[in-house]
């Protein structure tokens, strides 16, 4: 349960970031449609409203109100969204705080069937990551160019659980990121929960690659105003991140963030990704909860090192993957390719045969 609580520490922090960033936007900006997201929630207001409504719906299910009706509000104000979000976040924090570990196995309503509560909690947190990636793209499309970062490790940069050297803090403050002097107590992560979240990410990435398999080079390299700019670069980046973290944990290979060539084909990408995932899993198999609290020093930008706990970097990997897969799905739709359902709930239904 502590791992699931930490997922929502990140969820709530990141959603507040987006709501804060949207302050001052006009109604026309909040309701401006974005072509790439036309098959989902095409405006920033609709995307934020969807995130808030779905989180309330899941909380109702966990509290035994599976059919509670959400109050209809077709064009909620940001103030209204913030109020509803904060009410849900506060009630959810109390619920997750008080749930014993065995509660994760309790079945809750999900569509026409049921799933273990723990899986639905992880889905709800991952669902937020997915739609916040879209909302961040919309904010930037509306001209908001502030150095907002909503990855899990940006949370742990603003609220570190290990002391950072003064020089490191100065470097990141100079880049526009707040780094406090205080240090928080770390969450104690469960290795099995992290493994399951990572397995979902592996499955989801394979589904996206399979969906892209019929595209020629021109379409794989067609440019889009989001993320890494092309579908190919987005997929390559998912593997690059896996390899980078494994290299930093183990000290093997290249510790700088090395990118695969932009000409790498999907077959070669699949092979290399499989190797990185196998090395990651072998490393994680040797870690218990205590080992996950050990520090790892990384340098995502030359001359700007960072220190995190290994468990925090493991939480970063699947959330980072969900963020970029959300962009990849938008690109697939923009290329006329049906986007697969890669949600955690879809994955969990396969695992439980429902």
Image (spheres, rainbow, N blue to C red):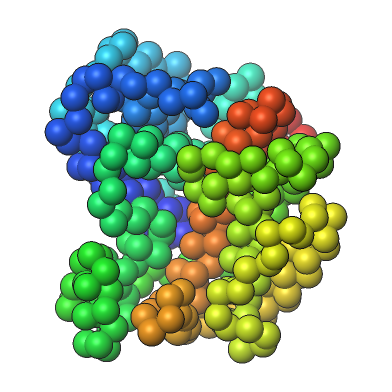
Q: Is residue 139 above or below residue 96?
A: above
Task: Name the spot of residue 37 as percent of width and height, x first.
Answer: 50, 27
Q: Quadrant of residue 31?
A: top left
The residue at 34%/67% (across/down) is 156
The residue at 28%/48% (across/down) is 145
- Frontmost residue, 315 versus 261: 261
Task: Name the spot of residue 86 as percent of width and height, x first.
Answer: 22, 37
**Apparent side of residue 260 relative to residue 36 in the rendered image (left or right):** right
The residue at 60%/46% (across/down) is 230
Task: Name the spot of residue 299 as percent of width and height, x first.
Answer: 45, 80
- Frontmost residue, 335 versus 310: 335
**Apparent side of residue 275 relative to residue 231 in the rendered image (left or right):** right
**Apparent side of residue 75 relative to residue 5 in the rendered image (left or right):** left
Q: Is residue 293 above or below residue 41?
A: below
Q: Is residue 63 visible?
A: no
Which of the image's four quarters has the C terminus? top right
Q: Is residue 75 visible?
A: yes
Q: Quadrant of residue 221?
A: top right
Task: Name the spot of residue 260 as percent of width and height, x first.
Answer: 68, 66
- Frontmost residue, 149 versus 264: 264
How many numbered callouts? 0
Q: Is residue 291 above or below residue 217?
A: below
Q: Quadrant of residue 10?
A: bottom left
The residue at 63%/53% (across/down) is 233
Q: Is residue 53 above or below residue 248?
A: above
């Amino acid at each position: 349960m502590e791992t699931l609580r930490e997922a929502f520490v990140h969820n709530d922090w990141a959603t507040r970031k987006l709501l804060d960033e949207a302050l001052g936007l006009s109604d026309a900006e909040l309701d401006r449609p974005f072509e790439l997201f036309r098959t989902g929630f095409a405006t920033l207001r609709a995307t934020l409203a969807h995130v808030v409504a779905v989180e309330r719906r899941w909380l109702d299910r966990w509290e035994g109100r599976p059919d509670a009706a959400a109050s209809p509000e077709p064009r909620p104000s940001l103030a209204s969204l913030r109020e509803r979000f904060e009410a849900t976040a506060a009630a959810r924090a109390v619920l997750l705080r008080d749930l014993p570990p065995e509660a994760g196995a309790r079945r809750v309503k999900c569509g026409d069937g049921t799933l273990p509560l723990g899986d639905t909690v992880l889905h709800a947190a991952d669902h937020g990551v997915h739609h916040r990636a879209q909302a961040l793209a919309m904010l930037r499309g509306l001209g908001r160019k502030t150095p907002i970062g909503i990855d899990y490790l940006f949370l742990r940069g603003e609220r570190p659980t290990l002391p950072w050297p003064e020089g490191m803090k100065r470097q990141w403050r100079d880049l526009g990121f707040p780094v406090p002097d205080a240090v928080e107590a770390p969450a104690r992560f469960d290795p099995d929960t992290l493994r399951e979240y990572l397995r979902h990410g592996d499955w989801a990435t394979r589904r996206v690659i399979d969906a892209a398999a019929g595209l020629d080079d021109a379409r794989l390299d067609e440019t889009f105003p989001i993320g890494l700019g092309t579908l190919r670069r987005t997929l390559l980046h998912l593997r690059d991140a896996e390899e980078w973290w494994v290299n930093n944990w183990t000290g093997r290979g290249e510790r700088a963030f090395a990118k695969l060539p932009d000409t790498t084909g999907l077959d070669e990408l699949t092979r290399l990704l499989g190797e990185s995932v196998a090395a990651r899993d072998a490393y994680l198999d040797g870690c218990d909860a205590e080992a996950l609290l050990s520090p790892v020093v990384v340098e995502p930008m030359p001359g700007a090192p960072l220190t995190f706990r290994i468990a925090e970097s493991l939480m970063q990997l699947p959330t980072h993957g969900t963020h970029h897969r959300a962009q990849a799905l938008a690109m697939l739709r923009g290329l006329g390719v049906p986007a697969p359902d890669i949600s955690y709930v879809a994955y969990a239904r396969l695992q439980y045969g429902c």
